[in-house]
Each structure stands twice: as C-alpha cells, then as structure tokens.
Image (cartoon, rainbow, N blue to C red):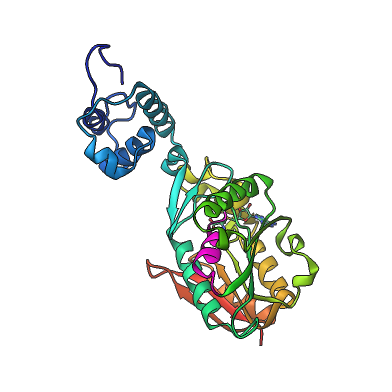
C-alpha cells in the first residue's frame, strides 16, 4: 500500500484499494473482511468509521493495516489478525493461544442455558454451579456467567493449556469491565478435565459443559489448512479415535454432577452414535443429541438420574 507522500489517503481510498487487492499479495479481500480489517486498524467503531470515510487516514492506521494484510495473506485466520471476535453477546480476544470460538458452540451455550433454566439442582433452581471443561478463550464459561447470571452462582472454567487460560483470564477481565457481577462468578483453573476441579464440587455441578477436541489424529490432514496450520493442535486432536476427550468428559460426569444434573457436550457431526453409546456406558440417562444451526447433530445432552 505504498502511496505518494503528499497525496491525502482517505479511509474510503484505503477500503477501495483493499477491495482491488492493492498492497495485497493474493488479490482483493472480500468486502465484509476489508471493512472489519479497516475498522480494527483504525481503532474506530464501525459507526464512527462510516462517518469518517472521507477524512484522511492516520499513518499509524495505515501501517497497522499493512501489517494485518501481510498476516492475512500468509494464511492466518481473519479472527487472529483482527484479535477479537464476537461470540453470542461477547466480544472476545482471540489469538493463536486458543481455538477460535465457532457458531455451533453458540448452540452448545444455548442448550446449556436452557438446562440451567430448567435445573432442579441448587437451592430452588438458584445458586447453581457449572463447569466448562476445556474453556479455551473462555467463550462458553463467560457466556454462561453473563447470560445465566441470575441462576448461576459459580462457573468453573478449566483447561490443560496455560496459554489458553492466559487468554481466558484476559477475556474475564474484559467481562469484569462490562458486567462485574457476572465476572465475579467465574473461577479459572488449570488441569486435565476434572483434575482441575476442587474435590468439594463432586456431586454438586448442575451442568457440565464442554467442547472437547474431537478430531482423530489421522483426520488432521482433512481439516482446512487455515485451521490445522494456525489453531492449537491440543484444541483439535483428541487422539487416535477422536473420541478420547469425549470419553474422559462423559466417564467423569456422574461423579461430579448433582442429582438430575446434566452434561452438555459438543461432538463431531459424524460422532452421534458413538457419543450416545459412550454416554450410556458412562451410566448417564436420558441421552439425546441436538442439532446445530446447519441441522447437523452436534450437541450431546445426558443426565444423571
Ligand atoms: C475444541 S477446544 C474448545 C475451546 C472453547 N471451549 C471453545 O468452545 O471455543 C478444546 C479445548 O480443550 C482443551 N483441552 C485439550 N485437552 C485437554 C485436557 N486433557 N484437559 C482439559 N482441557 C483440555 C484445549 O486446550 C482447548 O482449549
């Protein structure tokens, strides 16, 4: 994006150049993407940017934008380049320390919130304790703390990855700024699945929610290159069968759930039958699989009686 020094470059000019691929190795970016990149580089809200389109772009923003375009053209996911991404009502910080939260996981949260609303655990449906295992950015845990704040007393957010938890902690700070009472309910803890939780929670959780890794090792090469080259493998790969993490979460659930509590777990679209079988083997009842917005079977729900 080299420009003649004395020529005034407006935000609109930058946007048009990006659309044409000027300064971009791989050609033009799509319209929505260029707007997001420009918004992030400018540091302005979309509304403010829209009103300022014919004003001169700052040199700092032009430098930032150039750096972002180079990263994007190297194949880095848009969300990591932007550094933040929307998930339900949250604007989360995202980077290569954790998986980019996906739309299907918003359905997992929706399902968990319905279960929380209908829960008979806790004192009269209030004071519920919830755990999000493998929290990554904290997307699930923070959404439940925010949207379920009148019902939930504690939301435990755990992960094996210290890097992911550092990012989750930053997102928790972000939540604290907008909803301190919701943020105060969140506990961030490190460890493998249930090992991260204090033993006093055993038999006390109303809902266990998780989006565990569910890709089999041999299927790594089937993932889009943007995913397998940039997102943490620990967040994607479960092991040789792809079911290892699901087994760990479901086999531990009965010990940690309160009576009539339930597990809500995201699964791969081809794992419905295997997941139901594992839930039954784990001694869970009332097992069902819900569909995501694309109609694919992605959310396993199972209870203790
Ligand atoms: C598919 S990502 C989900 C991240 C986040 N919950 C979301 O939905 O965006 C799976 C997460 O599980 C974590 N994980 C992998 N193995 C784990 C283990 N043994 N114990 C706890 N967390 C683990 C990964 O670090 C990763 O953050």
In the current view of this chain or complex, which residue is farthest to the bottom? 305
| Figure quadrant of residue 124 | bottom right
Specify start and end residues of the magenta stretch as a single range.
138-150
The residue located at (76%, 74%) in the rendering is 202
Q: Magenta includes 141?
A: yes
Predominant SS along the magenta part: helix
On the rendering, which quadrant does ligand 1 occupy? bottom right
Image-based side of 275 in relation to 54, left or right: right
| Figure quadrant of residue 302 | bottom right
Q: Magenta includes 195?
A: no
Task: Answer yes or no: is residue 141 visible.
Answer: no
Image-based side of 218 in relation to 224, left or right: right
Query: For the C terminus, which image quadrant?
Result: bottom right
The residue located at (53%, 83%) in the rendering is 118
In percent of width and height, residue 110 lies at 47, 70
Is residue 91 placed above or below 121 in the rendered structure? above
Query: For the N terminus, which image quadrant?
Result: top left
In percent of width and height, residue 41 lies at 38, 33
Image-based side of 143 in relation to 247, left or right: left
């Amino acid at each position: 994006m080299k420009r003649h020094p004395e020529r005034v470059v407006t935000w609109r000019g930058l946007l048009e150049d990006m659309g044409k691929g000027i300064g971009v190795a791989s050609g033009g970016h799509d319209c929505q993407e260029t707007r997001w990149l420009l918004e992030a580089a400018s540091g302005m809200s979309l509304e403010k940017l829209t009103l300022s389109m014919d004003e001169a772009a700052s040199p700092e923003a032009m430098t930032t934008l150039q750096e972002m375009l180079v990263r994007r053209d190297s194949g880095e996911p848009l969300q990591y380049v932007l550094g933040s991404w929307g998930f339900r009502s949250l604007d989360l910080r995202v980077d290569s320390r954790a998986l980019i939260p996906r739309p299907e996981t918003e359905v997992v949260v929706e399902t968990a919130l319905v279960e929380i609303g209908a829960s008979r655990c806790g004192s009269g449906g209030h004071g519920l304790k919830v755990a999000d295992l493998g929290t990554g950015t904290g997307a699930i845990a923070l959404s439940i703390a925010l949207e379920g704040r009148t019902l939930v007393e504690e939301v435990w957010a755990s992960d094996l990855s210290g890097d992911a938890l550092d990012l989750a902690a930053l997102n928790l700070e972000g939540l604290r700024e907008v909803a301190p009472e919701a943020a105060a309910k969140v506990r961030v803890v490190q460890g493998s699945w249930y090992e991260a939780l204090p033993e006093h929670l055993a038999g006390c959780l109303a809902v266990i929610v998780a989006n565990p890794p569910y890709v089999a090792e041999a299927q790594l090469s089937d993932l889009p290159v943007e995913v397998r080259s940039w997102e943490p493998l620990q967040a994607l790969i479960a092991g040789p069968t792809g079911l290892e993490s699901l087994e760990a979460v479901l086999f531990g659930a009965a010990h940690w759930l309160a009576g009539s509590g339930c597990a809500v777990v995201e699964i791969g679209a081809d794992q419905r039958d295997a997941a139901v079988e594992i839930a039954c083997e784990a001694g869970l009842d009332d097992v069902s699989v819900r569909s995501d917005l694309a109609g694919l079977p992605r959310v396993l729900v199972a209870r203790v009686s």
